[in-house]
Amino acid sequence: MQPSREQKLWMYEHMVLSRRCEEQIAKIYFEGKTPVFNMANGPIPGEMHLSDGQEPVAVGVCAHLDAEDIVTATHRPHHQAIAKGVDLNKMMAEIFGKSTGLSGGRGGHMHLFDPAVNFGCSGIVGQGLGPAVGAALSRKMQGKPGVAVAFIGEGASNQGAFHEAMNLAAVWKVPFICVIEDNAWGISVSKRASTSVPRNDVRGASYGIPGHYVEGNDPYRIYDVVGEAIARARAGEGPSLIEVETFRLAGHFMGDAEAYRPKGEKDALLERDPIPKMRSRLIEDGDASEDELNSIEKKAEERIAEAIKFARESADPRPEDALTAVFA
Amino acid sequence: MQPSREQKLWMYEHMVLSRRCEEQIAKIYFEGKTPVFNMANGPIPGEMHLSDGQEPVAVGVCAHLDAEDIVTATHRPHHQAIAKGVDLNKMMAEIFGKSTGLSGGRGGHMHLFDPAVNFGCSGIVGQGLGPAVGAALSRKMQGKPGVAVAFIGEGASNQGAFHEAMNLAAVWKVPFICVIEDNAWGISVSKRASTSVPRNDVRGASYGIPGHYVEGNDPYRIYDVVGEAIARARAGEGPSLIEVETFRLAGHFMGDAEAYRPKGEKDALLERDPIPKMRSRLIEDGDASEDELNSIEKKAEERIAEAIKFARESADPRPEDALTAVFA
Amino acid sequence: MTESNDRKLTIARAMAESVAQEMRADERVFVMGEDIGALGGVYGNTRGLLEEFGDERIRDTPISETAFIGAAVGAAQDGMRPVVELMFVDFFGVCFDAIYNLMAKNIYFYGGSLKVPMVLMTSTGGGYSDGGQHSQCLYGTFAHLPGMKVVAPSNAYDAKGLMTAAIRDDSPVVFMYHKRLQGMGWLGTEAGATVKTPEESYTVEIGKAAVVREGADVTIVSLGLGVHHALKAAEQLSQEGTDAEVIDLRSLVPLDRETIRKSVAKTGRLIVVDEDYHSYGVSGEVIASVVEHDVSVLKASPARVAYPDVPIPFERGMEQFCLPNVEKILAAYQEMKSA
Amino acid sequence: MTESNDRKLTIARAMAESVAQEMRADERVFVMGEDIGALGGVYGNTRGLLEEFGDERIRDTPISETAFIGAAVGAAQDGMRPVVELMFVDFFGVCFDAIYNLMAKNIYFYGGSLKVPMVLMTSTGGGYSDGGQHSQCLYGTFAHLPGMKVVAPSNAYDAKGLMTAAIRDDSPVVFMYHKRLQGMGWLGTEAGATVKTPEESYTVEIGKAAVVREGADVTIVSLGLGVHHALKAAEQLSQEGTDAEVIDLRSLVPLDRETIRKSVAKTGRLIVVDEDYHSYGVSGEVIASVVEHDVSVLKASPARVAYPDVPIPFERGMEQFCLPNVEKILAAYQEMKSA
Ligand SMILES: Cc1ncc(C[n+]2csc(CCOP(=O)(O)OP(=O)(O)O)c2C)c(N)n1
Ligand SMILES: Cc1ncc(C[n+]2csc(CCOP(=O)(O)OP(=O)(O)O)c2C)c(N)n1
Ligand SMILES: [Mg+2]
Ligand SMILES: [Mg+2]
């Protein structure tokens, strides 16, 4: 399955949007945190997990999804949220902890929930798997369209929740896909040190479902493989497991010294940055001109700037609102 | 790997011991529970999970184990305990809740622990897997001999603990074996309704370790397959996963009406009772004479009767001892 | 012919009846759990449902509590109204993330923009020698953590009304039923739990305690099975001329502190009866809720009759030694009076 | 040259030093957990250990808490003395069975015939905008369930001594360290936690509270970070002529009720400061423990300054609104005095 030209441009646009988002957040994150770095300070306090480098996975998957489809994302959710169409202003406002944020500042960057596009995430590794299977079941029971995709990291594939959800989805044959972002690291622990198999695609056989591994952090190949799995799911043929090779260009979270990385790894990865790579490819393949891409990039920059402006200018929540929205 | 004649007789002896044990418990369990069945009453109160029919698994595995090897068993632990060499008197006394029991009546039939033979069990499905991996790790770190076997039911193979423990054991390459007793049912839920693959052996590939399925509830075949896995483990080559076809001739617990079983299933199973089957085979193969087997059976009966006498005649714990042995 | 309002039900049947009525009225309601289909639930509370509603809506699950409780959350967020069972509350350890961190917090993380209408029903309690991993109450454990309502009925009337209220609630509700109140003969049911229960559908408000016996001399606060101990103790006390008021909490979250405080303000004496572990649980909370409000109402030091801080032993004598009972309540009152 | 007994350590370094000393002395001691090797622990408490002891004894694990905590139990029962880390206490939901039902109960199920010598260390607390799944304390949750000792130091001296005691204990000990006391600059450490800590090995007895400030007018009981709030509030109160006694619980299980009762008997007033959720937790237990013993010692209704029963919000203003602080303690005292 090959993406159309429009889809390619959509993918590039959303990769760039995501990257600009992360770049800006990375910059703003340090406001108020210098000279002494204290995570509690600044306009964006708390932990911050950036997704630079992993954009191809998000767009390769979400190019197949509509608003009605369900995504549960991880603690590293920005690229996934952007690709799924989460409202950028509200998302940024949430990251800033503003009253206009997705949850009015209650969640923060690890807890982005947008019911309008059926997007959720969590701070607990593997926690999104069950809910995605349940949403898929809900669609099946209601006879409504929609597939559910749970994104997890390769480290999460060793969590019990993974096994239980895969088995349940397979037994109930619901329209569910688990997409594993294999960035080779779970914080400082390498995949090799944590996972008994080199690739998680083989684990599909444990559930009698297709397993795929997609190499190269390549948006088109991801699009291709995921497309088949989604078609299968939409046709009522049940779940699939897809692991995608990717890499993170940043630390696990901001402030990570990354001393655990072998020497040279980081530089080698920067050479393989998927965004300039896709840019050249679009031009080489004749899918877009420099001008078109410049314009996409400029718009993305503006869109992110606008979201940041919206977030900055939004009001803080009232402190006492902490006590509301506990129950429906 | 074939069992020697001595091993065959040992296996038969322990299968019979286990069966006599269950028969006696089944009888005594109803003391005090008629005419009105109330689980709380009688010399053996509480839930009771019998292992009739599953004896081949216990003996086929434990024929390879010494006291120093570790076994973590399930909520259905009698056959496993007996095959592992747990002190019969203390075990029976524990089932009766006596002061002379393995834990002085604190545990009961689901919580049989005998440090002398490194035997433990639990009432939580899959709970024994982690401890078995840890004991195996302990031996590896200490450079001491010993393999650890965790028994679970086929229903437990869908619990997250299973996945995590298998992966951990494989990553750390510890001398650990998971033996799944596939009796086709998890209480009233069939394997087909709960497990996405017909056989759990395929799940070994998820951990890069050997997976085996042993058909026929046959003690010799079980002995054979487990023997290879144990040799592997002892040689430092890491864990294995073995699923064994077996069946339970009783209900899930005593009092189970078994209405969920398809018509005729129970009768068909009774025809395949592994104990008379092994008896005939021992004779046919010239491994034992009627007399020898009669004598084994008689001794087993006596041994169980003795254990029951010991249990019955032992003193109850002092009620206030409930407050002791919480901490070491 | 028995009038509808004379009909007595066990809690098990009351729960099943409520679920069935709600399933008839609302096709988004469905049930998931281990052995809740053909078996009808180990504690009988889903009996008859498979026959009426079929296996799409009455779903036996694998032994995968994390997955199926997580799935219930996902389904609830997607417009369904799942009723999901955790067979024994003791098993919460394998799946509590899906409960306390996911089910209980997602409304908050959504900023209130989404509902999580689901019921988690789970059996509690010991007293029948089921050992340390099948006999706990864990009321305090669930009630301590924010975002989930927690109810625990003592009789069939409340059970049906609370279940109906729970299913209709747009927030997650944990429904803790005590095994020895279920009306399963094989567990030796407390007779007082089987009471008149209307056939028609009704709700009991979540968050309201009930004064199940009025009295002026001492307030005994309890929940679940403990309410029956308290009522029996009150009967005995009345023979000695002491007039005990008994409060059935029914709901732990929200906790009806008003009703408790009002009663203790009247009686000046407080005994809390709780089958959950003694420390850091329900008994401490009830006492603190009274004294932080107004310590001067107390004429005597309050007392608790709770499960000691030890694992639950199998053997009957040891277990009974630990469990709350009528004698312990009476002794607590004696000590209070003589102090 | 700094004298050894003048040396100040952060809690993170104190913990690592204790573990290192015990590992040198006893080769059965080893460490397992996520990112405790090359990274040295997200909160620095295993820094330097990998370099000294190598990756056999300092084991990074997969993200499989159920398996590796279960494995620690198995190893402990087999003669090892594991120190295992649950990175954030908030993650307990994925593995609590291995903790509360296995680690905490096996000594009992063995009838005391076996030891389970292990330490589970875990980080607690918020205040730095890490959101609702990375900021909880959950003290009450752990302390409620029998079979595990639970400690929570407020300073490096206690942290080192409690860690050494915990490693040498033959029963499971949960070691809860507060992130904002760790001395990791990036979390804005409370300065009072970094105190003089002897280089030589020593123990602090598990189960003994410390009177960290003597006073006659009011008792403020707390633990972890709350102790520092309490001490600051006491300083301010002293300027108004009020003499507050501050108790650092240090250990939740066993709970040193004697020390609390003795203090309140003296002061007649009690404020409990707890960053864990308000209801069914530490604050209720401390208050109940005092009044059930002798309610007459209280001159005023006791008060608690605890985290409200809501999930922890991300945004700073909302989170700070919920957290205990000096002002809230002072306000509680004012109300107590004017009542
Ligand atoms: C159950 C659980 N355990 C541990 C953590 C802490 N933690 C957060 S992210 C992370 C690493 C996750 O690795 P991976 O799944 O590969 O995702 P990545 O960060 O690489 O995107 C860990 C251990 C957690 N959030 N939840
Ligand atoms: C985590 C957990 N969930 C549920 C149960 C209740 N339960 C006890 S035994 C059992 C069925 C187990 O089936 P299987 O693993 O096949 O073992 P079998 O009983 O067939 O020997 C269930 C669901 C439990 N003890 N622990
Ligand atoms: Mg990763
Ligand atoms: Mg089975």
Image (cartoon, coloured by chain):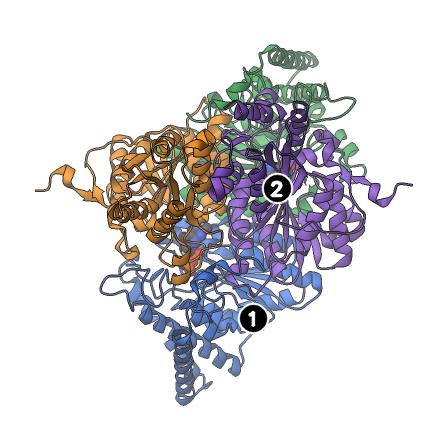
Chain colours: A green, B blue, C orange, D purple
Q: Nearer the viewer, mark 1 or mark 2?
A: 2
- Tell me if I can see residue A101 in this picture: no
Describe residue C278's horizontal placement relative to residue D270 as left or right.
left
* Between A4 and D116, the one nearer to me in the picture: D116
Q: Residue D251: image x %, image y %? A: 61, 45
Dot 2 lies on which element?
Answer: loop
Is A193 above or below relative to A239?
below
Q: Identify the residue at the far front of this view.
A: C338
Q: Residue at x 48, y 68 (%)?
A: B80
Give the chain of mark 1: B
Give the chain of mark 2: D
Q: Residue at x 36, y 70 (%)?
A: B25
- Tell me if I can see residue C325 in this picture: yes
User: Within the image, what quadrant is residue A174 found in?
Assistant: top left
Q: Residue A61: image x %, image y %? A: 55, 29
Q: Badge 1, how many Cα within 10 Å: few under 14, some, many 20+?
A: some
**Residue type at mark 2?**
Leu
Task: Estimate the spatial distance between the alpha carbons at disc 1 and disc 2, rounded to whole Å.
Answer: 41 Å
Q: Residue A276: image x %, image y %? A: 72, 23
Is D113 above or below relative to B173?
below
Q: Identify the residue at the far right of this view.
A: D1
Q: How many marks?
A: 2
**Residue type at mark 1?**
Val
Q: Which mark is residue B117?
A: 1
User: Within the image, what quadrant is residue D238 found in?
Assistant: top right
Which residue is labeled 2 in the image?
Answer: D249
